[in-house]
Amino acid sequence: EDQVTQSPEALRLQEGESSSLNCSYTVSGLRGLFWYRQDPGKGPEFLFTLYSAGEEKEKERLKATLTKKESFLHITAPKPEDSATYLCAVTSNTGKLIFGQGTTLQVKP
Amino acid sequence: DTAVSQTPKYLVTQMGNDKSIKCEQNLGHDTMYWYKQDSKKFLKIMFSYNNKELIINETVPNRFSPKSPDKAHLNLHINSLELGDSAVYFCASSQEVPGGPYEQYFGPGTRLTVT
């Protein structure tokens, strides 16, 4: 069964303190791995798609990487506005998007 | 603005009632979805429609019935509401690309509270 596990569940950082969020997955025939950001009371906002091991994508202070078993979302010098829940999801040959439970990030000034 | 929109934003109703949530996308996408997000913020797919045709139907009680009048709209009707139906429901859309995969764009959510 396709499964996605994110860690940690919650992360508190000081502004400027870099860190990484982990997304471990088991899926039969990975077609893509997605990262989303969700702010309280809003829908998930698309950040990145990664297709194959070794691929990396960047956007501002965020960098996503992918291996055959996991993905990392690296946050460099975070700011308070980066506070949100970050969701990882995978899609396989079934076409369904399977989400992890998310990591709630809080960045304190 | 191009977006996925849902109405209503909040829905409070009593057990046993029937209610509908509407979703519209003006992104020109051909596939639409309904997701349920529980109190632990876990998002799970319920249904998927491609060009008005049902393609994914997860293990959802048959009290839930999606309806797609055209490829820009996917509504969710819920009969005989139960306390356990309380959650946030998200609509999403995507454009299928040959070779895929395709990112999904989400609406703002509808918070359903059943009392």
Image (spheres, coloured by chain):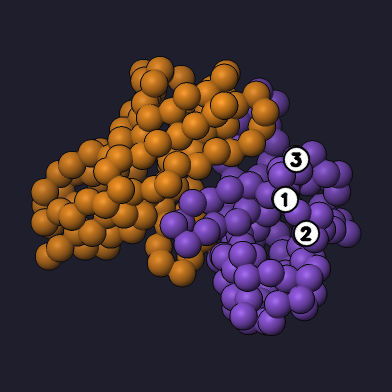
Disc 1 to disc 2, C-alpha distance: 7 Å
Q: Secondary structure at mark 1?
A: loop
Q: Residues within 10 Å of mark 1 (few under 14, many from 20)?
A: few
- Where is mark 2, residue-wise? B64
Q: Residue at x 88, y 59 (%)?
A: B69
Name the image quarter holding the C terminus of chain A: bottom left
> Front-most of A54 and A99?
A99
Which amino acid type corresponds to the residue marked 2 in the rendered image?
Phe
Q: Chain of mark 2?
A: B
> Front-most of B97 and B76?
B76
- Position in image of residue B10 (x %, y %): 60, 78
Which amino acid type corresponds to the residue marked 1 in the rendered image?
Val
Q: Is residue A35 left or right of residue B5?
A: left
Q: Residue at x 52, y 59 (%)?
A: B38
Q: Is residue A10 left or right of residue A32?
A: left
Which amino acid type corresponds to the residue marked 3 in the rendered image?
Ile
Disc 3 to disc 1, C-alpha distance: 11 Å
| Chain B painted colour | purple
| Chain A painted colour | orange
- Where is mark 3, residue-wise? B56
B9, above or below B103, in the image: below
Mark 2 and mark 1 in contact (Cβ < 8 Å)? yes
